[in-house]
Image (tube, helix red, strand yellow):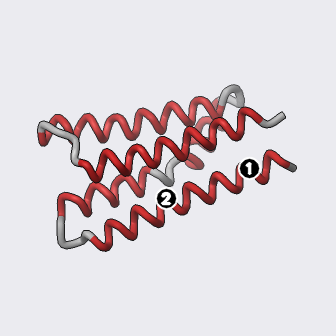
Amino acid sequence: MLFMELFVAFDGISLLIFAGLVLAGVLYRRRREIHKRLMLIAMISLLPPAYGRLIANVTHDNVELLVLGMMYASVLSCLLVDAWRHRRVHPAFAIGSALVIAANQLTYFAQTSTP
């Protein structure tokens, strides 16, 4: 029962981060360079359940670790494209990416540390 409570709690944290990123994106809708990055990272923050289902269709071993790796790859690829296109990573993208990775890392630790 504790596992499910932790899972739901951290899934709620991810939803709060999504809502915060979308709200910030809406508030910055007139500044296109900030708006588009916040909305993209908000969309990426919703991918872990989809990645989990995709991986669970293939294997049932280390699903949490593979989802975490896919999230790292998704965020890192966006950061690399942003850095390549603009010769720097935009601060809005860096902060949003850090929030998404931190939430996913906390979720992974919560899922793997419970008995």
Percent position of residue 80, x then y: 26, 34
Q: Position of residue 109 (x, y in %)?
A: 65, 36
Residue 84 lies, with reference to residue 34, above or below; the image says: above
Q: Residues within 10 Å of mark 2 (few under 14, many from 20)?
A: some
- Location of residue 67 by image quarter: top right
| Direction from residue 103 to residue 4 in the image, left or right | right
Identify the residue at image location x=25%, y=69%: 28
- Of residues 86 and 62, which is closer to you in this image? 86
State the residue at coordinates (41%, 33%): 73
Crowding near the residue tagged with mark 1, few <14, some 14–19, many ≥20 C-alpha atoms within 10 Å: some
Q: Is residue 16 left or right of residue 43?
A: right
At x 31%, y 45%, the residue is 94
**Mark 1 and 2 residues: CB-CB less than 8 Å, in contact?**
no
- Label 1 is placed on what type of residue? Leu
Looking at the image, the residue that sits furthest to the right is: 1
Label 2 sits on a secondary structure element that is helix
Q: What residue does disc 1 label? A: 6
In the image: residue 74, left or right of residue 31: right
**Which residue appears at 54% of the width and 35% of the height?**
68
Task: Give me the C-alpha separation between circle 1 and circle 2.
Answer: 17 Å
In the image: residue 14, left or right of residue 38: right
Question: What residue would you read off at disc 2?
Answer: 17
Q: Is residue 71 above or below residue 15?
A: above
First reached walking from the N terminus: tag 1 or tag 2? 1
Q: Amino acid at mark 2?
A: Ile
Q: Position of residue 57 (x, y in %)?
A: 65, 37
SS of the residue under disc 1: helix
Q: In the rendering, which numbered label is found on residue 62?
A: none
Give the x, y percent position of residue 10.
Answer: 64, 52
